[in-house]
Amino acid sequence: MTPQRLTAQEGAKFQCQVEDCGMLFSQCDFKAHLEMHDETRDHPFLCSVKDCAKNFDRRTDLERHQNIHEVQRNRCKHCSRMFAREEELKR
């Protein structure tokens, strides 16, 4: 999956109706997004870091997640939250 792009409201054809989500999508990304909310889907890729219980349905998602255990974190100057990837600071 490519890095997530936020869809502007005027370009959105679909909005996720799952409680506390409400993300906007233009087209095919919407179907893939809905799968994320399916609690019955398989998550065969487990993080091997001690005390981390995260698991993922795609190897690429696991590899991206493992970066948070290895890289220096970035602190948001607005809310002071920490992020593993600099691109997350822009959201």
Image (tube, helix red, strand yellow):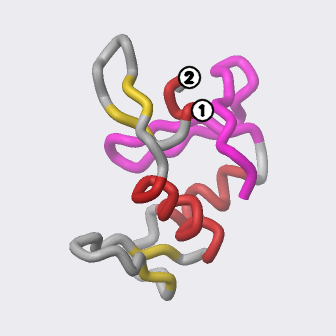
Quarter of the image where the N terminus is located: bottom right
Pointer 2: residues within 10 angstroms few (<14), some, or many (20+)? Answer: few
Stretch in magenta = 1-26
Please name the amino acid that badge 1 sits on: Glu
Q: Position of residue 27 (x, y in %)?
A: 77, 45
Lateral position of residue 76 relative to residue 89, left or right: left
Please name the residue shown 53% across and 40% down the image.
85
Q: How many marks?
A: 2
Is 82 located above or below residue 1 in the figure? above
Q: Position of residue 34 (x, y in %)?
A: 55, 59
Please name the residue shown 44% across and 53% down the image.
68
Spatial distance from mark 2 to mark 1, Cα to Cα? 6 Å
Reading the image, the residue beneath label 2 is 90
Which image quarter: residue 33? Answer: bottom right
Q: Which circle marks residue 39 in the picture? A: none
Q: Which circle marks residue 87 in the picture? A: 1
Please name the residue shown 57% across and 59% down the image.
64
Lateral position of residue 51 relative to residue 75, left or right: left
| Residue 42, visible in the rendered structure | no
Pointer 1: residues within 10 angstroms few (<14), some, or many (20+)? Answer: few
Q: Nearer the viewer, residue 56 or 9?
A: 56
| Residue 41, visible in the rendered structure | yes
Secondary structure at numbered mark 1:
helix
Lateral position of residue 2 relative to residue 38, left or right: right
Furthest toward the left, the residue is: 51
Q: Is residue 68 magenta?
A: no
Please name the residue shown 65% across and 42% down the image.
4
Is 25 located above or below residue 50 in the figure? above
Lateral position of residue 39 relative to residue 3, left or right: left
Please name the amino acid that badge 2 sits on: Lys
Question: Mark 2 and 1 residues: CB-CB less than 8 Å, in contact?
Answer: yes
